[in-house]
Image (tube, helix red, strand yellow):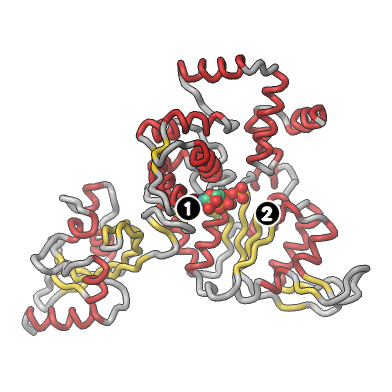
Amino acid sequence: MTNESWLKSMRNVLESYSDPAVLVDENYNVVATNEQYDFRFGERGDKDHRKCFEISHGYKRPCDLEGETCPMQAANESGVTSSVLHIHNTAQGKEHMGIETTPVVDELQRQYFIEVMKPIREVSAEPIADKMIGRSPAFNQLVDLIHRVGKTDTSVLLTGPSGCGKELAAQALHAVSPRTRKPFVTVECSGLTDSLFESELFGHVKGAFTGATSNRKGLVESARGGTLFLDEVGDIPLHLQVKLLRLIETRTYRPVGESEPYEADFRLICATHKNLPAMVEANEFREDLYHRISTFPISLPSLAERIEDLPLLVESILLRIDDTLPLRVSKEAMLLLAQQPFKGNIRELKNVLERAVVLRDNTEISEEVMHRALALSPSFVVKGGEGRDALKLLARKRYSLEEVEREYIQQLLASYSDKALIAEIAGCSLRTLYRKLKMGD
Ligand SMILES: Nc1ncnc2c1ncn2[C@@H]1O[C@H](COP(=O)(O)OP(=O)(O)OP(=O)(O)O)[C@@H](O)[C@H]1O
């Protein structure tokens, strides 16, 4: 076979993929592309043998020299298909791509690679609404894990501080899974009282208890074929945990008042901001349940751990708040934001930006407006002279220490529902917090 006819057969192979695919030689030159690729990247990559790293990333050197994993190198070393996650510049902007690279040789044993790029549509590297947004290495690692485990039926435990995106991650896991066309059902575990637990989860039959006037489907049944997401699983009281364990172990449940067990069919995803291993140590969480739910644990980064994503997140949140206005944040205001600890993570960032949008006078949010929006936050950090200004403001209003404390606690209560977290932010014990709340009554 001549090199030309080998290339022709490779082009046919590339066209057989429904995702963008390219053939790259060992010097990183793109030598053939399929139609999907030409559409996605808005050009024919093999036009003048441009380098893959140049087209995909705008780099002047191979990816590994730019601090990223080179998919070709990984495939070359292993001799089999290898997969990595990259963000590529495409005609649609920056996109997360799962890249599968397979080494092939031509008739003269020269090394080539077929790269198939699977766009990961459940997340975005561009500011758009209703998706997990990010580009930072910490975020990309998270996306890689979601993409890998999402396709399986493995139980996932999402951990991370409040407001860092655990629920969005659970939705993304469901979206990449084969169960995506079936329901995604959330169970808010923190609100489940003893009496509600079984009837909410398992449903009940008519006449099971006073008020049960008809059969009622439980959340486990609603999730049939799909995903059951147990949010704040660490809040389930110890004595109810055994019921959840039984459901997970036997994959059966019994509606209240029903004698026969029903088969359950769901993929389990749990989330918590609590330290479950520490709770197991303290005998507050069953060890057997912990092992059942944490087959694949994923720890989500806090906003501080992915602070590079701040401008992108700000842009996308402003779009969500009002996509009819060209709202933006000044450079100084962005710097001020970047200095905040954001213990409430992206939820707190959203609140601050909503306040800033209310307080703004024009479409650019200034440092001064951001200052005022932040001053309403419990964890506002002021530096140097700015700190003195804030204090002067409080003194001018003649707040007593007690009033400032009360106001602070009220703001915390408005931002968070978890009292343990509020106590942690306020730097006091849970008992002291409850005492102060009582005093305010
Ligand atoms: N990567 C992200 N991109 C854009 N918005 C995000 C991202 N992560 C979280 N958010 C937004 O931040 C808010 C909090 O997210 P989410 O409810 O998923 O957090 P959580 O970790 O489940 O919080 P909690 O522990 O308090 O339940 C939501 O409004 C969500 O849309």
Dot 1 lies on which element? helix
Foreground pick, 139 / 2: 139
Q: Nearer the viewer, residue 130 or 132?
A: 130
Q: Is residue 165 visible?
A: no
Residue 157 vs residue 130: left or right? right
Measuring 20% from the left and 57% from the top, which residue is drawn there? 53
Cα distance between the residues tagged 2 and 1: 29 Å
| Amino acid marked by disc 1 | Arg
Residue positioned most to the right? 210
Q: Earlier in the sequence, mark 2 or mark 1?
A: 2
Q: Residue at x 29, y 78 (%)?
A: 17
Near mark 2 (Cα within 10 A), the count class, few <14, some 14-19 or many ≥20, is many
Horizontal side of residue 239 vs 68, given as left or right: right
Q: Position of residue 58 (x, y in %)?
A: 20, 53
* Image quadrant assignment for residue 290: bottom right
Mark 2–mark 1 CB contact (< 8 Å) = no
Determine the residue positioned at 71% across, 78% down. Answer: 263
Please determine whether, in this image, residue 215 is positioned above or below residue 122.
Answer: below
Q: Determine which residue is flagged by label 2.
A: 233
Cβ at disc 2 under 8 Å from ligand 1: no
On the image, the x and y values in percent for residue 57 come to 23, 55
Q: Is residue 344 above or below residue 382?
A: below
Q: Is residue 26 left or right of residue 278?
A: left
Residue holding disc 1: 320
Using the image, tell me which numbered label, if any, was put on residue 405. Answer: none
**Who is closer to the viewer here, 209 or 235?**
209
